[in-house]
Image: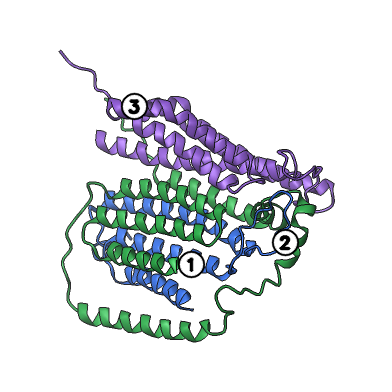
Amino acid sequence: MAKPKTTGMTLIVKTVTRLTVGLILLFGIYIILHGHLSPGGGFAGGVIVALSFVHLMLAFGKDVAVTKVSKNIASNLESIGALMFLFVALLGFLGGSFFLNILSKGTPFKLFSSGTIIFSNISIGIKVGVGLFAIFLALVILERAEKEE
Amino acid sequence: MTLYLLCLLLFCIGLYGVLRKRNLVKIIIGLGIMEYAMNLFFVLLGYRFHGRAPIEAQDQNILNMVDPLPQALVLTSIVIGLGVTALVISIAIRIYEKYGTFDITKIKRLKG
Amino acid sequence: MELHILLLFMILGAVVAVEVKDLLSSVIAVGAVGFALCLAFLILKAPDLAITQLVVEILCLIILIRATIKRDLPLTIEGRWIFNTISTVVFICVFLFFAWLALKELPSFGNPIMAVVKKYLEEGTTRTGAVNLVAAVILDFRAYDTLGEATVLFTSVIGIMAILRRPGRKKVK
Protein backbone atom coordinates (compact mmCIF):
# COMPACT_ATOMS: atom_id res chain seq x y z
CA MET A 1 0.00 0.00 0.00
CA ALA A 2 1.53 3.30 -1.06
CA LYS A 3 1.88 6.09 1.50
CA PRO A 4 1.22 9.57 0.04
CA LYS A 5 4.42 11.56 -0.14
CA THR A 6 4.47 14.50 2.25
CA THR A 7 6.30 17.59 1.07
CA GLY A 8 8.01 20.22 3.21
CA MET A 9 9.66 19.76 6.56
CA THR A 10 8.89 17.99 9.84
CA LEU A 11 5.83 18.46 12.05
CA ILE A 12 7.56 20.77 14.55
CA VAL A 13 8.57 23.21 11.82
CA LYS A 14 5.06 23.20 10.34
CA THR A 15 3.38 23.93 13.69
CA VAL A 16 5.72 26.81 14.52
CA THR A 17 5.30 28.22 11.01
CA ARG A 18 1.52 28.28 11.37
CA LEU A 19 1.91 30.41 14.49
CA THR A 20 4.54 32.85 13.30
CA VAL A 21 4.01 33.55 9.61
CA GLY A 22 1.06 35.86 10.21
CA LEU A 23 3.05 37.82 12.78
CA ILE A 24 5.97 38.29 10.40
CA LEU A 25 3.64 39.59 7.68
CA LEU A 26 2.02 42.00 10.15
CA PHE A 27 5.41 43.25 11.33
CA GLY A 28 6.47 43.92 7.75
CA ILE A 29 3.31 45.95 7.07
CA TYR A 30 3.90 47.92 10.30
CA ILE A 31 7.44 48.86 9.25
CA ILE A 32 6.23 49.97 5.80
CA LEU A 33 3.45 52.15 7.18
CA HIS A 34 5.55 53.85 9.87
CA GLY A 35 8.46 54.60 7.54
CA HIS A 36 8.37 58.33 8.18
CA LEU A 37 8.16 58.08 11.97
CA SER A 38 10.68 55.44 12.97
CA PRO A 39 13.57 53.69 11.21
CA GLY A 40 12.68 51.28 8.44
CA GLY A 41 10.83 52.44 5.39
CA GLY A 42 9.63 50.81 2.19
CA PHE A 43 12.70 48.71 1.35
CA ALA A 44 13.23 46.98 4.71
CA GLY A 45 9.50 46.39 5.16
CA GLY A 46 9.18 44.98 1.65
CA VAL A 47 12.00 42.50 2.24
CA ILE A 48 10.33 41.38 5.51
CA VAL A 49 7.04 40.73 3.66
CA ALA A 50 8.96 38.68 1.05
CA LEU A 51 10.64 36.72 3.86
CA SER A 52 7.26 35.76 5.31
CA PHE A 53 6.21 34.17 2.01
CA VAL A 54 9.59 32.44 1.67
CA HIS A 55 9.14 31.04 5.20
CA LEU A 56 5.76 29.61 4.17
CA MET A 57 7.24 27.99 1.08
CA LEU A 58 10.25 26.50 2.87
CA ALA A 59 8.14 24.88 5.59
CA PHE A 60 5.19 23.56 3.59
CA GLY A 61 6.60 22.88 0.14
CA LYS A 62 6.01 24.64 -3.14
CA ASP A 63 2.34 23.80 -3.73
CA VAL A 64 0.84 25.47 -0.66
CA ALA A 65 2.71 28.72 -1.26
CA VAL A 66 1.80 28.80 -4.95
CA THR A 67 -1.93 28.65 -4.15
CA LYS A 68 -1.55 31.80 -2.07
CA VAL A 69 0.62 33.81 -4.49
CA SER A 70 1.05 32.21 -7.91
CA LYS A 71 3.57 33.26 -10.52
CA ASN A 72 1.12 35.34 -12.58
CA ILE A 73 -0.18 37.17 -9.54
CA ALA A 74 3.40 37.90 -8.46
CA SER A 75 4.49 39.46 -11.74
CA ASN A 76 1.27 41.46 -12.08
CA LEU A 77 1.48 42.83 -8.54
CA GLU A 78 5.07 43.86 -9.04
CA SER A 79 4.23 45.85 -12.15
CA ILE A 80 1.31 47.48 -10.33
CA GLY A 81 3.64 48.55 -7.52
CA ALA A 82 6.11 50.15 -9.94
CA LEU A 83 3.30 51.93 -11.80
CA MET A 84 1.88 53.26 -8.52
CA PHE A 85 5.26 54.78 -7.67
CA LEU A 86 5.40 56.50 -11.05
CA PHE A 87 1.83 57.74 -10.60
CA VAL A 88 2.74 59.34 -7.26
CA ALA A 89 5.70 61.00 -8.97
CA LEU A 90 3.63 62.34 -11.84
CA LEU A 91 1.08 63.68 -9.36
CA GLY A 92 3.68 66.28 -8.48
CA PHE A 93 3.08 67.90 -11.84
CA LEU A 94 -0.16 69.29 -10.45
CA GLY A 95 1.93 71.34 -8.03
CA GLY A 96 4.65 72.51 -10.35
CA SER A 97 7.45 70.02 -10.90
CA PHE A 98 8.27 66.30 -11.05
CA PHE A 99 8.06 64.52 -7.65
CA LEU A 100 6.80 67.56 -5.77
CA ASN A 101 5.22 66.74 -2.41
CA ILE A 102 1.79 68.27 -2.82
CA LEU A 103 -0.51 66.75 -0.18
CA SER A 104 -0.93 68.48 3.16
CA LYS A 105 1.87 68.09 5.65
CA GLY A 106 -0.15 67.78 8.84
CA THR A 107 1.37 67.86 12.30
CA PRO A 108 4.56 65.90 12.94
CA PHE A 109 4.52 62.54 14.83
CA LYS A 110 1.10 61.56 13.51
CA LEU A 111 0.50 58.73 11.05
CA PHE A 112 -0.92 60.87 8.25
CA SER A 113 1.65 63.64 8.22
CA SER A 114 4.24 64.16 5.48
CA GLY A 115 2.18 64.25 2.33
CA THR A 116 3.03 61.75 -0.39
CA ILE A 117 5.83 59.99 1.50
CA ILE A 118 3.48 57.35 2.91
CA PHE A 119 2.10 56.44 -0.54
CA SER A 120 5.62 56.13 -1.94
CA ASN A 121 6.51 53.82 0.94
CA ILE A 122 3.47 51.58 0.33
CA SER A 123 4.08 51.25 -3.41
CA ILE A 124 7.80 50.51 -2.94
CA GLY A 125 6.95 47.96 -0.23
CA ILE A 126 4.57 46.08 -2.53
CA LYS A 127 7.04 46.14 -5.42
CA VAL A 128 10.10 44.96 -3.49
CA GLY A 129 8.22 42.31 -1.50
CA VAL A 130 6.47 40.62 -4.38
CA GLY A 131 9.49 40.96 -6.70
CA LEU A 132 11.85 39.18 -4.30
CA PHE A 133 9.31 36.39 -3.80
CA ALA A 134 9.10 36.01 -7.59
CA ILE A 135 12.88 35.52 -7.69
CA PHE A 136 12.62 32.74 -5.13
CA LEU A 137 9.73 31.10 -7.02
CA ALA A 138 11.82 31.05 -10.21
CA LEU A 139 14.72 29.35 -8.36
CA VAL A 140 12.51 26.67 -6.75
CA ILE A 141 10.56 25.85 -9.90
CA LEU A 142 13.82 25.29 -11.76
CA GLU A 143 15.05 22.88 -9.12
CA ARG A 144 11.80 20.94 -9.24
CA ALA A 145 12.12 20.71 -13.03
CA GLU A 146 15.65 19.33 -12.94
CA LYS A 147 14.76 16.76 -10.28
CA GLU A 148 11.97 15.36 -12.39
CA GLU A 149 14.14 14.84 -15.48
CA MET B 1 42.56 56.97 9.94
CA THR B 2 43.30 53.39 10.94
CA LEU B 3 39.57 52.66 10.55
CA TYR B 4 39.66 53.83 6.93
CA LEU B 5 42.73 51.68 6.24
CA LEU B 6 41.13 48.58 7.80
CA CYS B 7 38.05 49.15 5.66
CA LEU B 8 40.16 49.34 2.50
CA LEU B 9 42.00 46.19 3.61
CA LEU B 10 38.63 44.39 3.65
CA PHE B 11 38.02 45.68 0.12
CA CYS B 12 41.40 44.31 -0.98
CA ILE B 13 40.59 40.85 0.42
CA GLY B 14 37.46 40.79 -1.72
CA LEU B 15 39.48 41.97 -4.71
CA TYR B 16 41.97 39.12 -4.21
CA GLY B 17 39.04 36.68 -4.18
CA VAL B 18 37.72 38.03 -7.49
CA LEU B 19 41.11 38.01 -9.24
CA ARG B 20 42.68 34.75 -8.11
CA LYS B 21 40.02 32.15 -7.44
CA ARG B 22 38.88 29.64 -10.02
CA ASN B 23 35.57 28.59 -8.54
CA LEU B 24 32.70 30.74 -9.78
CA VAL B 25 30.92 30.87 -6.42
CA LYS B 26 34.13 32.07 -4.74
CA ILE B 27 34.26 34.95 -7.23
CA ILE B 28 30.69 35.89 -6.34
CA ILE B 29 31.55 35.78 -2.63
CA GLY B 30 34.52 38.11 -3.25
CA LEU B 31 32.18 40.54 -5.04
CA GLY B 32 29.87 40.53 -2.01
CA ILE B 33 32.74 41.30 0.37
CA MET B 34 33.74 44.27 -1.81
CA GLU B 35 30.18 45.63 -1.56
CA TYR B 36 30.17 45.35 2.26
CA ALA B 37 33.49 47.20 2.49
CA MET B 38 32.33 50.11 0.35
CA ASN B 39 29.02 50.52 2.21
CA LEU B 40 30.92 50.61 5.51
CA PHE B 41 33.35 53.21 4.14
CA PHE B 42 30.52 55.56 3.18
CA VAL B 43 28.89 55.40 6.59
CA LEU B 44 32.26 55.89 8.33
CA LEU B 45 32.67 59.18 6.45
CA GLY B 46 29.53 60.67 7.96
CA TYR B 47 29.98 59.80 11.64
CA ARG B 48 30.29 62.52 14.24
CA PHE B 49 31.65 61.96 17.75
CA HIS B 50 28.84 61.94 20.37
CA GLY B 51 26.30 62.29 17.59
CA ARG B 52 22.73 61.02 17.61
CA ALA B 53 20.70 59.06 15.09
CA PRO B 54 19.02 61.31 12.45
CA ILE B 55 15.47 61.01 13.86
CA GLU B 56 13.71 63.85 15.65
CA ALA B 57 12.37 63.32 19.16
CA GLN B 58 9.40 64.98 20.78
CA ASP B 59 9.98 68.24 22.68
CA GLN B 60 13.73 68.09 22.23
CA ASN B 61 15.96 70.25 20.11
CA ILE B 62 18.76 67.98 18.88
CA LEU B 63 21.82 69.79 17.59
CA ASN B 64 24.37 67.03 17.05
CA MET B 65 23.01 64.56 14.52
CA VAL B 66 25.16 62.34 12.38
CA ASP B 67 25.14 62.97 8.66
CA PRO B 68 21.96 61.53 7.04
CA LEU B 69 23.06 61.97 3.44
CA PRO B 70 25.57 59.06 3.21
CA GLN B 71 23.00 56.87 4.98
CA ALA B 72 20.44 57.59 2.26
CA LEU B 73 22.95 56.66 -0.47
CA VAL B 74 24.00 53.43 1.28
CA LEU B 75 20.34 52.38 1.75
CA THR B 76 19.98 52.39 -2.02
CA SER B 77 23.27 50.56 -2.47
CA ILE B 78 22.39 47.67 -0.12
CA VAL B 79 19.22 46.78 -1.99
CA ILE B 80 20.91 47.07 -5.41
CA GLY B 81 23.65 44.73 -4.13
CA LEU B 82 21.00 42.12 -3.37
CA GLY B 83 19.55 42.37 -6.88
CA VAL B 84 22.96 42.02 -8.54
CA THR B 85 23.95 39.02 -6.37
CA ALA B 86 20.68 37.21 -7.18
CA LEU B 87 21.15 37.78 -10.93
CA VAL B 88 24.77 36.56 -10.93
CA ILE B 89 23.84 33.45 -8.91
CA SER B 90 21.13 32.54 -11.40
CA ILE B 91 23.66 32.83 -14.26
CA ALA B 92 26.03 30.55 -12.30
CA ILE B 93 23.25 27.95 -11.84
CA ARG B 94 22.61 27.92 -15.58
CA ILE B 95 26.34 27.55 -16.30
CA TYR B 96 26.53 24.53 -13.98
CA GLU B 97 23.63 22.88 -15.78
CA LYS B 98 25.23 23.32 -19.17
CA TYR B 99 28.90 22.49 -18.43
CA GLY B 100 28.74 20.36 -15.28
CA THR B 101 31.40 22.35 -13.41
CA PHE B 102 31.99 25.69 -11.70
CA ASP B 103 35.63 25.86 -12.84
CA ILE B 104 36.23 28.93 -15.01
CA THR B 105 39.21 27.46 -16.86
CA LYS B 106 36.98 24.77 -18.32
CA ILE B 107 34.16 27.03 -19.48
CA LYS B 108 35.72 28.04 -22.74
CA ARG B 109 33.67 26.43 -25.45
CA LEU B 110 32.12 29.12 -27.62
CA LYS B 111 29.50 27.96 -30.06
CA GLY B 112 30.15 29.71 -33.30
CA MET C 1 37.36 50.98 20.24
CA GLU C 2 34.50 48.57 19.55
CA LEU C 3 34.68 49.48 15.88
CA HIS C 4 38.29 48.32 15.67
CA ILE C 5 37.44 44.93 17.18
CA LEU C 6 34.45 44.54 14.87
CA LEU C 7 36.52 45.41 11.79
CA LEU C 8 39.21 42.88 12.80
CA PHE C 9 36.49 40.23 13.12
CA MET C 10 35.17 41.12 9.66
CA ILE C 11 38.65 40.86 8.13
CA LEU C 12 39.17 37.44 9.76
CA GLY C 13 35.77 36.25 8.49
CA ALA C 14 36.54 37.49 4.97
CA VAL C 15 39.89 35.65 4.89
CA VAL C 16 38.14 32.44 5.99
CA ALA C 17 35.40 32.93 3.36
CA VAL C 18 37.84 33.39 0.49
CA GLU C 19 40.36 30.65 1.37
CA VAL C 20 38.39 27.65 2.68
CA LYS C 21 37.92 24.83 0.16
CA ASP C 22 34.41 23.75 1.22
CA LEU C 23 31.75 25.93 -0.43
CA LEU C 24 29.14 25.69 2.33
CA SER C 25 31.66 26.87 4.97
CA SER C 26 32.60 29.91 2.94
CA VAL C 27 28.93 30.87 2.46
CA ILE C 28 28.40 30.70 6.23
CA ALA C 29 31.51 32.85 6.78
CA VAL C 30 30.12 35.51 4.42
CA GLY C 31 26.92 35.45 6.47
CA ALA C 32 28.95 36.13 9.62
CA VAL C 33 30.65 39.11 7.92
CA GLY C 34 27.23 40.50 6.97
CA PHE C 35 25.88 40.23 10.52
CA ALA C 36 28.99 41.94 11.91
CA LEU C 37 28.38 44.74 9.39
CA CYS C 38 24.84 45.13 10.77
CA LEU C 39 26.33 45.56 14.27
CA ALA C 40 28.80 48.14 12.91
CA PHE C 41 25.89 50.13 11.44
CA LEU C 42 24.21 50.14 14.87
CA ILE C 43 27.38 51.43 16.57
CA LEU C 44 27.64 54.19 13.93
CA LYS C 45 24.11 55.41 14.82
CA ALA C 46 22.36 54.33 11.60
CA PRO C 47 19.27 52.26 12.61
CA ASP C 48 17.61 52.36 9.15
CA LEU C 49 20.65 50.75 7.58
CA ALA C 50 20.96 48.13 10.32
CA ILE C 51 17.39 46.85 9.76
CA THR C 52 17.82 46.79 5.97
CA GLN C 53 21.24 45.10 6.07
CA LEU C 54 19.96 42.38 8.46
CA VAL C 55 16.99 41.29 6.35
CA VAL C 56 18.88 41.60 3.04
CA GLU C 57 21.68 39.45 4.45
CA ILE C 58 19.21 36.70 5.42
CA LEU C 59 17.69 36.64 1.93
CA CYS C 60 21.15 36.66 0.29
CA LEU C 61 22.20 33.65 2.41
CA ILE C 62 19.10 31.70 1.34
CA ILE C 63 19.81 32.37 -2.34
CA LEU C 64 23.54 31.53 -2.04
CA ILE C 65 22.86 28.22 -0.28
CA ARG C 66 20.40 27.28 -3.03
CA ALA C 67 23.25 27.55 -5.54
CA THR C 68 25.93 25.68 -3.63
CA ILE C 69 24.21 22.72 -2.01
CA LYS C 70 25.18 19.36 -3.55
CA ARG C 71 27.44 21.07 -6.04
CA ASP C 72 30.95 20.83 -4.56
CA LEU C 73 33.95 19.78 -6.57
CA PRO C 74 37.70 19.57 -5.85
CA LEU C 75 40.14 21.74 -7.75
CA THR C 76 43.85 21.22 -8.42
CA ILE C 77 46.65 23.77 -8.60
CA GLU C 78 47.86 24.61 -12.09
CA GLY C 79 51.27 25.86 -13.19
CA ARG C 80 52.45 29.50 -12.98
CA TRP C 81 50.68 29.78 -9.65
CA ILE C 82 53.52 31.51 -7.76
CA PHE C 83 54.00 34.22 -10.37
CA ASN C 84 50.28 35.04 -10.48
CA THR C 85 49.90 35.22 -6.71
CA ILE C 86 52.97 37.41 -6.21
CA SER C 87 51.94 39.85 -8.95
CA THR C 88 48.43 40.15 -7.42
CA VAL C 89 49.89 40.84 -3.96
CA VAL C 90 52.27 43.46 -5.39
CA PHE C 91 49.38 45.17 -7.17
CA ILE C 92 47.33 45.23 -3.96
CA CYS C 93 50.24 46.74 -1.97
CA VAL C 94 50.69 49.50 -4.57
CA PHE C 95 46.94 50.18 -4.42
CA LEU C 96 46.97 50.42 -0.61
CA PHE C 97 49.97 52.78 -0.64
CA PHE C 98 48.26 55.23 -2.98
CA ALA C 99 45.03 54.92 -1.02
CA TRP C 100 46.93 55.87 2.17
CA LEU C 101 48.32 58.95 0.42
CA ALA C 102 44.80 59.95 -0.65
CA LEU C 103 43.18 59.28 2.72
CA LYS C 104 45.42 61.83 4.39
CA GLU C 105 43.45 64.60 2.63
CA LEU C 106 40.10 63.59 4.10
CA PRO C 107 38.83 65.25 7.32
CA SER C 108 39.73 63.14 10.33
CA PHE C 109 37.30 60.50 11.58
CA GLY C 110 34.51 61.96 13.69
CA ASN C 111 34.55 65.57 12.51
CA PRO C 112 32.77 65.74 9.16
CA ILE C 113 32.39 69.00 7.31
CA MET C 114 28.62 68.68 6.63
CA ALA C 115 28.27 71.69 4.37
CA VAL C 116 25.60 70.19 2.09
CA VAL C 117 23.46 68.68 4.83
CA LYS C 118 23.05 71.80 6.98
CA LYS C 119 20.00 72.90 5.02
CA TYR C 120 18.38 69.44 5.18
CA LEU C 121 18.87 69.27 8.94
CA GLU C 122 17.40 72.70 9.64
CA GLU C 123 14.29 72.66 7.50
CA GLY C 124 13.78 68.93 6.90
CA THR C 125 10.94 68.42 9.35
CA THR C 126 9.09 71.64 8.54
CA ARG C 127 9.22 71.30 4.76
CA THR C 128 8.36 67.62 4.44
CA GLY C 129 6.56 66.83 7.68
CA ALA C 130 8.51 63.61 8.18
CA VAL C 131 10.26 62.94 11.46
CA ASN C 132 12.70 60.36 10.07
CA LEU C 133 15.22 62.49 8.19
CA VAL C 134 16.67 59.62 6.14
CA ALA C 135 13.17 58.83 4.76
CA ALA C 136 12.69 62.54 4.02
CA VAL C 137 15.96 62.57 2.05
CA ILE C 138 15.30 59.45 -0.01
CA LEU C 139 11.61 60.07 -0.72
CA ASP C 140 11.31 63.82 -0.98
CA PHE C 141 14.57 65.66 -1.50
CA ARG C 142 16.27 62.97 -3.59
CA ALA C 143 13.32 60.96 -4.88
CA TYR C 144 14.80 60.66 -8.38
CA ASP C 145 17.51 58.33 -7.05
CA THR C 146 14.81 56.11 -5.52
CA LEU C 147 13.14 55.93 -8.93
CA GLY C 148 16.47 54.75 -10.37
CA GLU C 149 16.80 52.10 -7.68
CA ALA C 150 13.26 50.82 -8.29
CA THR C 151 14.15 50.50 -11.98
CA VAL C 152 17.32 48.52 -11.23
CA LEU C 153 15.42 46.08 -8.97
CA PHE C 154 12.69 45.65 -11.57
CA THR C 155 15.30 44.93 -14.26
CA SER C 156 17.02 42.32 -12.11
CA VAL C 157 13.72 40.52 -11.38
CA ILE C 158 12.84 40.45 -15.09
CA GLY C 159 16.36 39.22 -15.89
CA ILE C 160 16.15 36.34 -13.42
CA MET C 161 12.74 35.26 -14.66
CA ALA C 162 14.07 35.28 -18.23
CA ILE C 163 17.25 33.31 -17.42
CA LEU C 164 15.61 30.63 -15.28
CA ARG C 165 12.77 29.80 -17.61
CA ARG C 166 11.97 26.17 -18.28
CA PRO C 167 12.73 25.49 -21.91
CA GLY C 168 9.31 24.42 -23.22
CA ARG C 169 7.46 21.17 -22.77
CA LYS C 170 8.41 17.87 -24.31
CA LYS C 171 5.76 16.31 -26.51
CA VAL C 172 3.98 13.33 -24.93
CA LYS C 173 3.46 10.51 -27.40
Residue marked by disc 1: B38
Nearest the camera: C88 or B2?
A: B2
Chain whose colour in the figure is green: C
> Residue at left 61%, top 44%?
A124
Q: How far is disc 1 from disc 2 in space, using C-alphas? A: 25 Å
Q: Position of residue B58 (x, y in %)?
A: 71, 48
Tell me the colour scheme of the image.
Answer: by chain
Please tell me which residue is depicted at 58% across the width and 51% down the height of the picture. C151
- How would you rate the neighbour count of disc 1 (Cα within 10 Å): few for under 14, some for 14-19, many for 20 or more? some
Which chain letter matches label 2? Answer: C
The answer to whether residue C144 is left or right of residue A11 is right
Colour representing chain B: blue
Q: Which residue is mark 3?
A: A14
Residue at horizontal 46 percent and vertical 53 percent from the top: B82
Q: Which mark is residue C6?
A: none
- What chain is tagged by disc 3? A
Left or right of A8: which side holds B62? Answer: right
Q: Nearer the viewer, residue C96 or C74?
A: C96
Q: Which mark is residue C121?
A: 2
Instruction: Point out the image quarter for the N terminus of chain C.
Output: bottom left
Residue B12 vs residue C158, the one in the foreground: B12
Letter of the chain in purple: A
